[in-house]
Every structure is written in structure tokens, then in C-alpha cells.
Amino acid sequence: MSETADSRHWQMLDPSLDPSDPDAYLRTAIRWHFGPETGSPFWLRRVGRLDFDPLTDVRTYDDLRLFPNVVDELRTVPVEDLIPRGYGPRPPAPRVFESGGTTGAPKRAILMPDWIADAVDRMLRGPQFAGREPSNMLVLTPTGPHKIGCMYDYIAERQNTVKFCIDMDPRWVKKIIADKQAEQAEAYLEHILDQAEHILATQRIGLLVTTPPVLRACARRPRLVELINAKVELIFWGGAHMTVDERFVLRHEHFPNVRMISRYGSLMILESATERPGLSPDEDIVYDPRSPVVTFRVVDPETGRPVEYGERGQIVMNHVSKGMFLPNNAERDTVIRIPGRAGQIGDSVSSPAPLDSFNGEKVIEGVY
């Protein structure tokens, strides 16, 4: 294949495009990630240990089940080894983000600049920004190495607004909870709320980005409730779990003047699934992934077989893009299996809830 034809071939993997032929997109991505000139050192090293040939045996999304779950290796692999060689001998520097450490040492994923640019475009088209006048943001989430907070830096730059944030270390909270230091955990949460209250009291804030545990804590502090209802137009939440009943109480009893929208995802899919439109605010939220780049399946954790629609099972996530390939990742959550939208690969999900333990580690959400 000529260099020009090859470039056209890889165009299908452009992050800004919505693939129209999912199986062709998958086969192109497999050729990219397992081709010696384009694949990452991480996958090219590993291919010899697979008991199948990705280039010939992976033809459809069902075949992603052939892969082992490799995400635990992301705790220690040098991040440079994750960059596909197809980005060139001097590739653009990725942003490196880390997981919250809920199930052990944090895992690391890379977001290449082309992915970030498109992710910001999609965020701006999403329900938290579309149809709203740009406003200042308070990102009441982990920042530092965590994607949930850092992506809003790009939004503020694009919209010419201001992003306010706080100091929050979710790993410290998990550590002191695991050590049964409830008073220390509560004191740390109050420290978080003190920071938020000062920003809200002194600055113009239209968007509050936060997590369910922190939002529940805000609802217990009358001054914060008053400030949020007076100033904030939209609460955008995620990063942990919230029941229908909790959402109802927060919306109707504590923050009746504020819209609430959520998303559901994992660092290991590099983005989040979005709320399905058209449902009542008092119904279970249905989350639709960005198929075919991100796909879900919901399985019985004992057998690995799909559960019936409407039943609860463990979620397995796949991410297939130019910058990252992470298939067959059994996550720490259980969800209700929901039929996907027309043309979608795999399942949609609702009612996420954490497993009690995962890979021998107790699951502690803390504040994230």
C-alpha cells in the first residue's frame, strides 16, 4: 500500500469521525495496534504471548473476548510504551491520567492530543454546555493526575471562562476509610467543603462539577445549599454512584433551582457514557456508550455469559481508538443490562453499583 493510500486508510481512525462501519473500523484499529510500524511497544511485545492472531482472528466486536484483560499492567508499564508508533518517531506528548486507586495502585492511561481535541469538542456539544451561555466553573472533584478535573482546563480555555478547583486527594480518603479512621475522613470532607464554600461565596459560578459523595455532603451544609441554589445553574455529577432515591431527594429537597446531569465511565475507556435523553428525571438513568469506540457488555461474573436484559451483571468495557486499545476490561461495577440504541454495538446500562470486592481488594469509593 502506498504512503498516500495508507494515510487514507488510517483516516478511519480519526477521533473526530463517527465510524459508519463498526466492523471495518475495528479491523482497521487492530491493524494499526498490531502492525509493527504503527502499534505500541506495549501491544507488540504482548502479541507473542496471545494464543490467537489479532490480525486474522479478530473480525467483529464479539472477538474482543479473545483478549486477556490487561489493565492491571497499566499500573507499572512505562507510559511511553503505550504510544502507537504510527504517531511517528517523535510523537506528540500525551497527557497521562491516573485512576482513583479504588482497587489498588492506580492505573495510567494516555490521551493523545488528537483525542483530547475531539473530546473537548464533544464535551462542548454535550448537555452540560450545549444551549447554555458559557459560565465560570467550580470543579469540586479530584484534580492532579485525575482526568475528571483536568479536562475542564481545556473547556475554560475554549470558552474564555474561569475554572475554579480545590485540593482533593481521593486516595488519602480511601486510605483513612480503609484504616477505619471515620473522624479523619469526615474532617477531610469538611476541609473540601470549606474550600468550595469560600469559592462559591466570593465568585460567580454557573456550573458545578462534582461527585455524589461530595454533593451529598454539600446538602448537609445549609450555607452551601443556599449558595448553590442562588448561583449555580447546572450540577454535572459522576465518578461515583447515586441511587434514584438519592437523586430525587437532592433534586427536590436540596437543590430545586438547579438542573442535574450525570455521566458514567472509567479512565480505562478514556471518556464517559452519556444519559439517554427522553427519560423522566425520576426514572433510572440509562447510559449509552460512544459505540463503536466504546462498547459495553454485561455478564455473569462467574460464567462470563451475558445476563438477560433487565438483569444485573458485571460490566465489561472495550475501548478501541487510534491512541489506545483496551479490550475486555471487567470493571469493578455491576449494572443493569439495557438494550442499546439502534445501530449500537453492545449494551447500554443503568443503575451502576460497586462490587463489594474486586480482585481480592475491598472496593472503597470514598469521595470518588
Image (tube, helix red, strand yellow):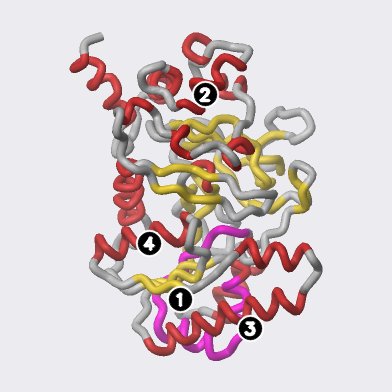
- Mark 2 belongs to which amino acid? Tyr
Q: Give neighbour class at mark 4: few <14, some 14-19, many 20+ (Cα, 10 Å).
A: many
Q: Quick one: label 1 or label 2, which is nearer the N terminus?
A: 2
Q: Give neighbour class at mark 3: few <14, some 14-19, many 20+ (Cα, 10 Å).
A: few
Visible residue check, residue 288:
yes
On residue 220, which mark appears? Answer: 3
Q: Quick one: label 1 or label 3, which is nearer the N terminus?
A: 3
Residue at x 66% of width, y 54% of height: 102
Asked whether 198 or 72 is in front, the reply is: 72
On residue 83, which mark appears? Answer: none
**In the shown orientation, is residue 96 left or right of residue 296?**
left
Distance, label 1 to label 2, CA atoms, is 40 Å
The stretch in magenta equals 214-240
Residue at x 37% of width, y 22% of height: 38
Q: What residue is disc 1 on?
A: 258
On residue 152, which mark appears? Answer: 4
Distance, label 1 to label 4, CA atoms, is 20 Å
